[in-house]
Image (cartoon, helix red, strand yellow):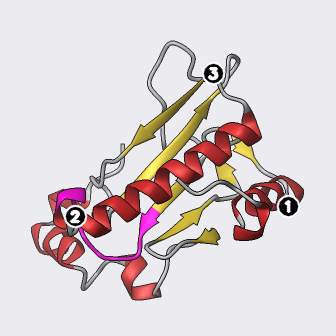
Amino acid sequence: MTTSAWHDGERWLALPEGSECPICLNARPLDVVAERETSWITAPVAAPLPGYACVVSKQHVVEPFELSPAAQGAFFRDAMQVARTLSELFNPIKMNYQINGNTLPHLHMHLYPRLTDDPFVGAPIDGSATGFVRTAPELDAIKRALSPSSGAEEI
């Protein structure tokens, strides 16, 4: 089991306020495959599920309620458009949504398209699992589907 930044009070306080947030320090998250006005969409090579993606707020906040009402709407519209696109691409039986921020307190929503034969059937998803290694063509397909030119319907 890894130790949480929660156990280092000084470090933990620097994460939510942004001065030590890796996303803010790098000016964007890793593995960005698409960008919207208020968010980045990430899809790492190694992932818990083939269709996994994450919607990351461009504004550093910890909780969705810290965004202005307009920014809340934009963030959730982005997330739902990405979820719809992933659903069309992977044809899951269910889409799971997860906002935690326990490890990285910068607003982000994990999107997990659930398949009938995924390794987490009957159990919660282990977000740290990396059982699927996606190829460049698989990631390119996600990137193409999420690109503005793909004709993906705006919500």
Looking at the image, residue 19 lies above or below residue 69: below
**SS label for mark 3:** loop
Could you tell whether 81 is left or right of 149 in the image? left
Give me the residue at 55% from left, 38% from top: 112
Part of the protein shown in magenta: 56-65
Q: Which mark is residue 73?
A: none
Q: Which mark is residue 69?
A: 2
* Residue 44 part of the magenta segment: no
Across and down, in percent, residue 70 comes to 28, 68
**SS label for mark 2:** helix
Give the residue type that dot 3 points to.
Ile
Give me the residue at 20% from left, 71% from top: 16
Task: Determine the CA span between mark 3 and mark 2.
Answer: 31 Å
What secondary structure characterizes most of the magenta part?
A: loop
Give me the residue at 39% from left, 87% from top: 25
* Residue 58 part of the magenta segment: yes
Foreground of the two, 56 or 76: 76
Q: Which mark is residue 136?
A: 1
Find the residue positioned furthest to the top: 122
Across and down, in percent, residue 97 comes to 44, 39
Give the residue type that dot 1 points to.
Ala
Across and down, in percent, residue 34 comes to 64, 69
Across and down, in percent, residue 99 comes to 34, 47
Foreground of the two, 53 or 73: 73
| Mark toward the start of the polypeptide (2 vs 1) | 2
Task: Determine the CA span between mark 2 and mark 1.
Answer: 37 Å
Q: Which residue is mark 3?
A: 93
Tally of numbered discs? 3
